Image (spheres, helix red, strand yellow):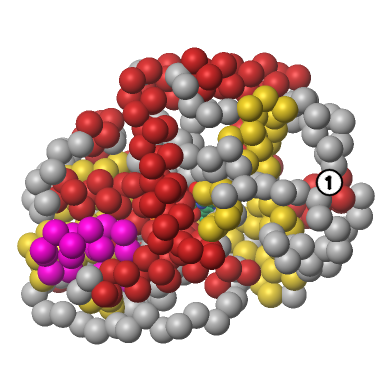
Amino acid sequence: MTIGTPLWLDEATPEVPCRSADKVDVAVIGAGITGCTCAYVLAQGGLSVRVHEARGIGTGASGRNGGFALRGAAARYDVARETYGIEPARELWRRTEDALDRLQSVAGDAFRRTGSLRLAADADERTDIRGEFEALREDDLAAEWRDELPRLRPDFRGAIFHPCDGSVQPARLVQRLATRAVEAGVAFEEHSPVRSVEDLEAERVVFATDGSGRGLIPELDEALWPARGQVLATEPLGERLFGCPHYARQGFDYWQQLPDGRIVLGGFRDFSILTEMTDEETTTEPIQEALDAFLVELLGYLPKVTYRWAGIFGLTQDLLPLVGPVPGHEGVWVAAGYSGHGNVLGLLCGELVAAAILGRDDPLLELFTPARLVQHV
Ligand SMILES: Cc1cc2nc3c(=O)[nH]c(=O)nc-3n(C[C@H](O)[C@H](O)[C@H](O)COP(=O)(O)OP(=O)(O)OC[C@H]3O[C@@H](n4cnc5c(N)ncnc54)[C@H](O)[C@@H]3O)c2cc1C
């Protein structure tokens, strides 16, 4: 069994050619989905860009997640409408649908358009997700209600099928985003941890570090809370059980079956919510045992588990990312804090922060403004 290295990062990949660049217009911290996308758009816009990555490309949350490529943001759509307003929520959902199309075109065989199922784990959750389903339909966003849930135990009480969602091999996606950025002229420096923003020879700096990258700007540390997610992957199963990503209990449990038959299962953070509010990237027994127990409930037996890993993502108070200039820090920008929902949103926000630096306005920037959560004293 492999502990620590995610299944996604355990595949041979072509090297992304790395080189250094002297003084640049923009230094990006973090080579995940956000940083690679942002760097590409900036280079396309004519700026010189250097990406600093403390480890290897795609080895943060982007190479450690559940592989769900979902539209929207971390909140349920009906809750998002109430919290952010109907128009902003609808705009955000539509824009992530478009971002999914762009993700698909870069990802190639790293993406499958499977749809996804948001399940109700009990009667209360059924009421909640019926509310989401109705809100989606009212706003002309595609969604189908499912009462028949073959292969699932009867205590699941219905589900929403989201037809535009998909499944992604996230590490392979980042590799392709990085290759595209290199072709556009971006310089990558791997194994290059940034220890001080002032040391970066750049006009502007972008934090694309989601839940990591702490200790550089105290105000960002206060607004972006690190959270740990834990995942496992089984050996390939002989039987095809699940055709698309499934998630239940407000996304606390999630699983999918890959084309080779493996189950990838993650979640159960809420079983030990306080210990999981950490940026320590290690697996723990209580959560891994909860994942094993859930596998037995799901399948009726415990198959061989071949990978166990952990990753860190960034949570915000209102579950929306911070995208834009960091108040009180001239020339410093951020795109981070997807609250566990960053595969598609990370791509969109990488594009958005780059567009903002290039002087292009966008209605979503108001919704995501860091000033709402970052207090400058
Ligand atoms: C276990 C888990 C499961 C998840 N499941 C899903 C899912 O199924 N679907 C979904 O949409 N989202 C999911 N997420 C969230 C999603 O993975 C992230 O939101 C997304 O990958 C963030 O991408 P990013 O590029 O912003 O950050 P990251 O991929 O975390 O990249 C940030 C990079 O910054 C680097 N870095 C940090 N500090 C420094 C420094 N000082 N100097 C240089 N480099 C630095 C890190 O090494 C890291 O590589 C999950 C997250 C986790 C942890």
Residue 101, placed above or below residue 190: above
Of residues 180 and 223, the one nearer the viewer is: 180
Image quadrant occupied by the C terminus:
top left
The type of residue carrying mark 1 is: Leu
Q: Quadrant of the N terminus?
A: bottom right
128 in magenta: no
Q: Could you tell me which secondary element the residue under label 1 belongs to?
A: helix
Residue drawn at (28%, 30%) of the image: 367
**Residue in the image at 70% along x and 21% along y:** 126
x, y (%) of residue 318?
40, 31
Front residue of 372/264: it is 264
Along the viewing direction, whichever of 269 and 369 lies nearer the viewer: 369
> Is residue 224 in view from this perspective?
no
Residue 285 coordinates in the image, percent (x, y): 72, 59
User: Which percent across, then down, holds residue 99?
Assistant: 38, 46
Residue 232 located left or right of residue 181: right
Q: Magenta residues, as a range?
A: 36-54
Would you identify the image quadrant in which residue 39 lies? Answer: bottom left
Q: Quadrant of ligand 1?
A: bottom left
When the figure is inspected, residue 200 is found, relative to residue 211, above or below; the finding is: below
Residue at the limit of the structure toward the right, as seen here: 300
Quick one: 110 or 200, which is closer to the camera? 110
Q: Is residue 307 above or below residue 229?
A: below
* Residue identified by numbered label 1: 298
User: With respect to residue 104, does 317 lie above or below?
Assistant: above
Instruction: Look at the image and tell me whether residue 320 can be seen.
Output: yes
Give the image quarter of residue 189.
Answer: bottom left
